[in-house]
Image: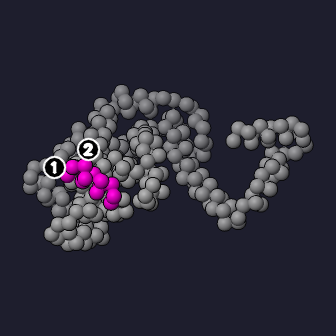
Amino acid sequence: MIGNWSVVISFSLLTPGLSQLQIFTLLYLPMFRSLPLAKVLLYVLLTTYAVITLIPFLWALSASFKPLSEIVSGTPNFLPQNFTLDNYRQIFLQEPLFLRWLFNSMVIAVSVTLLNLLFNSMAGYALARLSFVGKNFWFFLILAVLAVPAQITLIPTFLILKAIGWLNSYQGMIVPSMVNATFIFMMRQFFINFPQELEEAAQLDGLNTIGIFRYIILPLAKPALAAQAIFVFMGSWNNFLLPVVILFEPEMFTLPLGLNTFKGQYISYWNYIMAASMVFTLPALSIYAFFNRYFIQSATFTGGKG
């Protein structure tokens, strides 16, 4: 990319009468002509989608540094005219529960992610590799669960949590979400394509089923585990429906629920909402950046023997 820009700059210095569009046309048109039309259309479509997706995020980032009066003025400007950090000072220093909401969200999301990685992987491995009575029944039951919308189970979940006294608690948020049928099915499909020779060699070395799963299977399943970790963490981190049903004390709110308190009946503090939303996105971006290389491997993993 740097080399391309140096060529453009040199070309513009040598031909000052040409516009930048003409320079780019002269330099890059032959390259695009050599590409298939379908690939060019795909690049255009993906670039357009990326721009459409990025614009709202950039506007929210810009609005987090604006006073409320500038946001509601109706002037369509991306750069703040009155740049201020007061919005971030307000949510961190003046809002006493914001850090508690951040802590609650982190505890719940991390706990749900770790428990899902453990239980979904164990269940997927059992369905893919082990032989036991009722194996096909449990597999088809999991497939049936995939067809049930989560909203249908919301009221039964509330009644069960109320009966055992887990409303407005961490365990009430974590336990109902610690297993996910979608990712049990995903891990089962991953382990079905797993080279069986590795397990046979481990059995010859004296490892039992638990040892094989712990020392052989899990280390080689990092791509699938990383993809699962990203989706589970994002789902738990952004979850609004379950907290709004079972959490009723402000001290136990998660961030999505806490952000809703900045919206009033007559006025909404969009400057605080945008600032808090930017803080809200940082952990999710960090998780994706950390697991990104494993996530790409999971998309290209074929289960072939290497």
- Picture coordinates of residue 94, whole percent (x, y): 35, 29
Report crowding for label 1: few under 14, some 14 to 19, many 20 or more residues within 10 A (C-alpha): many
User: Please, which colouring scheme is shown?
Assistant: one colour
- Picture coordinates of residue 193, whole percent (x, y): 37, 62
Most foreground residue, 131 or 18: 131
- The residue to which callout 2 is attached is 111
- Picture coordinates of residue 250, whole percent (x, y): 24, 41
Choose the circle earlier in sequence order: 2 or 1.
Answer: 2
Most foreground residue, 201 or 279: 201
Disc 1 on helix, strand or loop? loop
Most foreground residue, 51 or 205: 205
Q: Quadrant for the C terminus, please.
A: bottom left
Residue 206 marker: none
Magenta segment boundaries in residue numbering? 196-208
Q: What residue lies at 73% left-to-right and 39% top-to-bottom?
A: 3
- The residue to which callout 1 is attached is 167
Give the Cα distance between marks 2 and 1. 17 Å
In the image, what residue type sits under mark 1? Leu
Disc 2 on helix, strand or loop? helix
